[in-house]
Image (tube, rainbow, N blue to C red):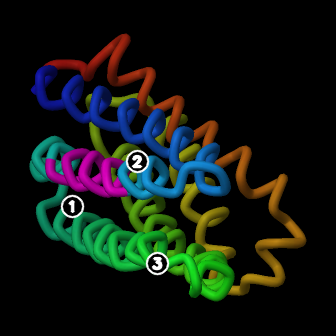
Amino acid sequence: MNATARTAGAAYLLMFLAAVVAQQTIATHRDLSYAAYLLVVVFYVVVTAFFYLLFEPVSRALSLLAAFFSLVGCAIQAAICALLRVPPQFDAAALKLYATAFPIPLVFFGIYCFLLGVLIRKSTFLPKPLGMLMMIAGVCWSTFLAPRLATALQPYILMPGILAELSLTLWLLARGVKER
């Protein structure tokens, strides 16, 4: 069980690192950004699979539902990444469409984070405050259902989401889970 948790934590950390590279290079190195975003998707699929295995004993149905929302978000994010590969003459339009579509997978990831929070709180092997943080992150990411609201609240919704997911990542890497 600890190997599963630590692998999920490692994949989560790699996903964060790839996301930073993707965001910082989108305006200057489109090919690098595209590759980094695809790695984000791959690592998030890995995280999803390992979290499913980790939380299946807590609630198989809820773990499966969480995995479903995450995988749908990953599929949408992968499709949106294709906009980074358009020919240069369509560059401005593609970037505008990319920026408009980018929040869509965040809603799915928000539901995923909320459900993970519920699973963490129901579990006996992770601290309950981590579950509450993930539930708050889920609510924050879900505000992207209303893009104008999300834009207005952006600094306030990004920080709890990043804090929660990084806290879970670092906990898994440093402490793992309590063995049953």
Q: Quadrant of residue 54?
A: top left
Count of number-bearing discs = 3
Q: Position of residue 144 (x, y in %)?
A: 65, 76
SS of the residue under disc 1: helix
Which residue in the structure is indicated by mark 1?
Answer: 63
Amino acid tagged 3: Leu
Which residue in the structure is indicated by mark 3?
Answer: 83
Q: Is residue 43 magenta?
A: yes
Q: Position of residue 93 (x, y in %)?
A: 64, 88
Q: Which residues are magenta?
A: 38-49
Q: Is residue 62 magenta?
A: no
Q: What's the distance in space between the residues labelled 3 and 2, CA to CA?
A: 14 Å
Q: Quadrant of the N terminus?
A: top left
Q: What's the distance in space between the residues labelled 2 and 1, CA to CA?
A: 27 Å
Taken as a whole, is the magenta stretch helix, strand or loop? helix
Amino acid tagged 1: Ser
Circle nearer the viewer, 1 or 3: 3
| Front-most of residues 176 and 22 | 22
Q: What's the distance in space between the residues labelled 1 and 3, CA to CA?
A: 31 Å
Which residue in the structure is indicated by mark 2?
Answer: 36
Circle nearer the viewer, 2 or 1: 2
Q: Earlier in the sequence, mark 2 or mark 1?
A: 2
- Which residue occupies 64% across, 44% down? 24
| Front-most of residues 94 and 179 | 94
SS of the residue under disc 2: helix
